[in-house]
Image: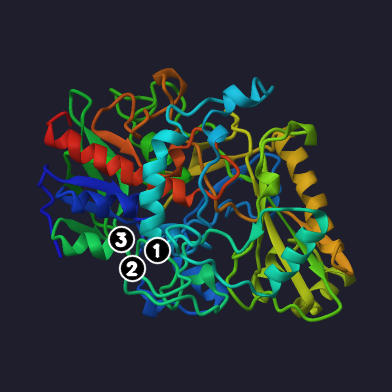
């Protein structure tokens, strides 16, 4: 395993080890590039995982102080926890459910297809489906996505069987157990899914793809990758020419160090990445690094989300089996006749009883709430996820007075639903309930959005420097050796779960950085 000197200015520093950073770091090492991944959290291997929702939540979650504003319900229910982000090696690939879907062709060019939507800051991506197709193929192979490369789909549990029966009754045509980065059969030294039902806690069997135990060990075996856990980056440094030169970070004991670098890649999720750029302000960059456009932190997206649960006369036991192996894709198409642009997916979802009691209807009590929990074993559930509209006012900013444990301003997350988001959510609630009503549900109930897991857009990709933060390679418009490598570079969010796209972009970016370094362009 590599160990690089703090003064080694030949290395690429990658900040974050999740779908973007973990993939990028491993790929760079495989290209022969000396790479240090800086991860703010600890390293918890598979043997450290426990099938305990709250126990693992406390162990792996980013629980540092945050503030929240805006009209979204999360600001009322979870003001200090607007998002569920993992602070550990592997990032949110430890916590995610595994859904791996490609963007639809039109979703790369939504400004062209949707037109001018009042209040929405829509922009076409500077890349398209054709350019991304080979990288999607590489990502699907790397993740072992079911229903690609001849890999069979996962089996359907009772939760899926109910969804499928309802979908058939309503005439939906695209319903199956999904394209999932969870082994349906042994592959690449990892076993198949054992249907334990604890996908969000960290997969105890290793069947679910994670950078923690797939990509990062491959990178480490090259001798070109060092993963430095418990190392929280506080500031990116630069020289008099504006070129970045390294990062200031705090170790496990709070002691601060500077790691020199040839290239810096930011992959800290859509909260921490813009926060780091803003906290790296200097006399040369008074508004923060890479922020000549004023777009750092702006255009925050979290997907249109919500859930529908239903009660049935007979037991369902939705918690048994893979959490999200079930999807209805028919509503994902762009069809403005429904009263909104863009589309959404319906995906099976089960929360364990501890989480269900917290998230079903936060703050609620009384007979309606308790009888639902009493009937937990008779419950089926789905998550609704769709394209939300980027709005400049939805933003991650630095709090004017609140500081973290290092004395740095904490992020404030502001979000208001766009009218299009609300119209889509109401349609999704109606159709989700209809799926269950069609197969005899005794009761259906929509639930509000949870703390965000799909955090996107705060350092968006743009063709013109004035419109965003990074170019088509994730390279910042302002500083050529500074890159963004996570979901914050998303120009728009699409209807699909973002992880596959983040991985595909990271693989493409690693190839680009390696070539540009060889040519000495960076």
Q: Quadrant of the N terminus?
A: bottom left
The x and y percentages for residue 306 are 70, 53
Q: Quadrant of residue 241?
A: top left
- The residue where tag 3 is placed is 215
| Horizontal side, residue 392 vs residue 63: left or right | right
Q: Is residue 461 visible?
A: yes
The x and y percentages for residue 427 are 79, 45
Task: Assess disc 1: are there few (<14), some (14-19) or many (≥20) residues with their C-alpha within 10 Å of its C-alpha.
Answer: many
Element at label 3: helix
| Mark linked to residue 213 | 2
Element at label 2: loop
239 and 376: which is toward the camera = 376
> For the residues marked 3 and 1, what is the alpha-carbon distance in whole angstroms?
7 Å
Q: Quadrant of the C terminus?
A: top left
Task: Assess disc 3: are there few (<14), some (14-19) or many (≥20) residues with their C-alpha within 10 Å of its C-alpha.
Answer: many
In contact (CB < 8 Å): disc 1 and disc 2: yes
């Amino acid at each position: 395993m590599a160990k690089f000197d703090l003064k080694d200015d030949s290395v690429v520093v990658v900040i974050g080890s999740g779908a973007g950073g973990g993939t990028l770091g491993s790929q760079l090492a495989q290209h022969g590039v000396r790479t240090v991944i800086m991860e703010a959290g600890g390293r918890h291997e598979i043997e450290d995982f426990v099938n305990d929702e709250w126990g693992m939540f406390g162990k792996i979650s980013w629980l540092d102080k945050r503030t929240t504003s805006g009209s979204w319900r999360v600001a009322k229910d979870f003001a200090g926890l607007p998002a569920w982000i993992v602070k550990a090696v592997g990032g949110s690939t430890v916590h995610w459910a595994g859904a791996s879907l490609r963007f639809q062709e039109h979703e790369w060019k939504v400004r062209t297809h949707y037109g001018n939507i009042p209040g929405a800051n829509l922009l076409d991506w500077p890349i398209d489906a054709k350019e991304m197709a080979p990288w999607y193929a590489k990502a699907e192979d790397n993740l072992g996505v079911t229903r690609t490369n001849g890999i069979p789909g996962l089996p359907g549990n009772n939760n899926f069987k109910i969804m499928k029966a309802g979908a058939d009754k309503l005439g939906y045509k695209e319903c199956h157990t999904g394209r999932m980065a969870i082994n349906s059969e042994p592959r690449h030294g990892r076993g198949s899914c054992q249907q334990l039902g604890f996908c969000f806690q960290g997969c105890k069997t290793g069947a679910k793809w994670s950078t923690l135990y797939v990509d990062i060990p491959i990178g480490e075996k090259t001798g070109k990758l060092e993963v430095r856990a418990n190392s929280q980056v506080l500031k990116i440094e630069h020289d008099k020419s504006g070129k970045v030169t390294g990062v200031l970070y705090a170790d496990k004991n709070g002691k601060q160090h500077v790691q020199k670098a040839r290239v810096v890649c930011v992959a800290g999720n859509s909260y921490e990445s813009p926060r780091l750029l803003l906290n790296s302000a200097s006399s040369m960059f008074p508004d923060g690094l890479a922020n000549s456009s004023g777009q750092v932190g702006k255009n925050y997206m979290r997907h249109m989300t919500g859930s529908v649960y239903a009660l049935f006369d007979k037991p369902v036991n939705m918690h048994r089996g893979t959490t999200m192996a079930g999807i209805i894709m028919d509503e994902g198409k762009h069809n403005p006749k429904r009263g909104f642009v863009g589309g959404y997916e319906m995906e099976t979802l089960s929360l364990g009883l501890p989480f269900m009691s917290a998230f079903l209807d936060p703050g609620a009590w009384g007979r309606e709430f308790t009888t639902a929990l009493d009937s937990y074993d008779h419950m089926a559930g789905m998550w609704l996820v769709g394209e939300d509209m980027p709005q400049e006012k939805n933003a991650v900013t630095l709090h004017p007075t609140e500081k973290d444990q290092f004395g740095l301003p904490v992020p404030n997350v502001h979000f208001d639903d766009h009218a299009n988001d609300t119209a889509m959510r109401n349609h999704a609630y109606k159709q989700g309930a209809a799926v269950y009503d069609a197969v005899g549900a005794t009761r259906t109930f929509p639930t509000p959005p949870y703390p965000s897991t799909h955090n996107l857009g705060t350092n968006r990709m743009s063709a013109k420097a004035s419109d965003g933060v990074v170019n088509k390679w994730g390279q910042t418009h302002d500083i050529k050796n500074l890159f963004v490598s996570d979901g914050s570079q998303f120009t728009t969010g699409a209807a699909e779960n973002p992880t596959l796209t983040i991985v595909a972009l990271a693989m493409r970016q690693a190839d680009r950085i390696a070539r540009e370094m060889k040519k000495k362009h960076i």
